[in-house]
Image (cartoon, rainbow, N blue to C red):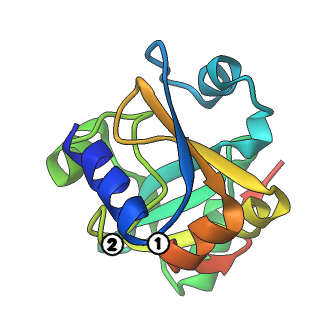
Amino acid sequence: MHVLESIRAWLSEQGVAYRELEHEPTRTSEDSARVRGEELSIGGKALLLKVDDAFGLFVMSAALRVDSGAIRKKLNARRSRFATSDELFELTGLVPGSVPPFGRPILPFDLYVDESIGRNERIAFNAGSLEHSIFLQTGDYLRIAQPEIFRFARE
């Protein structure tokens, strides 16, 4: 619950209006969209990737898939891979499916957001828990998260 509490406090400090929903545990983007009653594309899927020697958090519409080649090209990297479940837990205390779309000050990573996030008025995401989702306006999300934005998702 530490990450969820940190998100709540940070959103309040930043003056960001948000809605929270408690629900059954959801591990997949599809399950999350179903319990939220939202289109899959509204979901912000956050993936922890190791690019060369550093971990970064990559956020895209849950309706899309990551294009690792685009990430390597943009970041001038030779290798990229998904973090393992063990690495994710060691670095964040979180399990797959619970990672929120925030780098610093919530999670200790550089944050990259795919252009697809800007297509929707709002973003929804599991907030450090498989049982808690947060909804907020996309403009507010981008303003406070301050990510590097580029295209790295595909259909």
Q: Quadrant of residue 17?
A: bottom right
Using the image, tell me which numbered label, if any, was put on residue 111: 1
> What's the residue at 57%, 75% (across, down)?
72
The crowding category of the residue bearing disc 2, from other C-alpha atoms within 10 Å (few below 14, some 14 to 19, many at least 20), is few
In this orientation, does residue 152 appear?
no
Residue 15 location (% of width, % of height): 48, 68
The crowding category of the residue bearing disc 1, from other C-alpha atoms within 10 Å (few below 14, some 14 to 19, many at least 20), is many
Q: Is residue 72 above or below residue 34?
A: below
> What's the residue at 48%, 51% (across, down)?
47
> Mark 1 near mark 2, Cβ–Cβ under 8 Å?
yes
Q: Is residue 135 above or below residue 147?
A: above
Residue type at tag 2: Arg
**Secondary structure category for the residue under label 1:** strand
Residue 65 location (% of width, % of height): 70, 47
Q: How many marks?
A: 2
Residue 48 location (% of width, % of height): 41, 55
Mark 1 or 2, which is nearer the eye? 2
Q: Identify the mark nearer the N-term, 1 or 2.
A: 2
> What's the residue at 61%, 72% (across, down)?
142
The residue to which callout 2 is attached is 104
Residue type at tag 1: Leu
Determine whether, in the image, residue 107 is placed left or right of residue 70: left
In this orientation, which residue lies closer to the viewer: 102 or 76? 102
In this orientation, which residue lies closer to the viewer: 128 or 97? 128
In this orientation, does residue 57 appear?
yes
Q: Quadrant of residue 124?
A: top right
In this orientation, which residue lies closer to the viewer: 133 or 110? 133
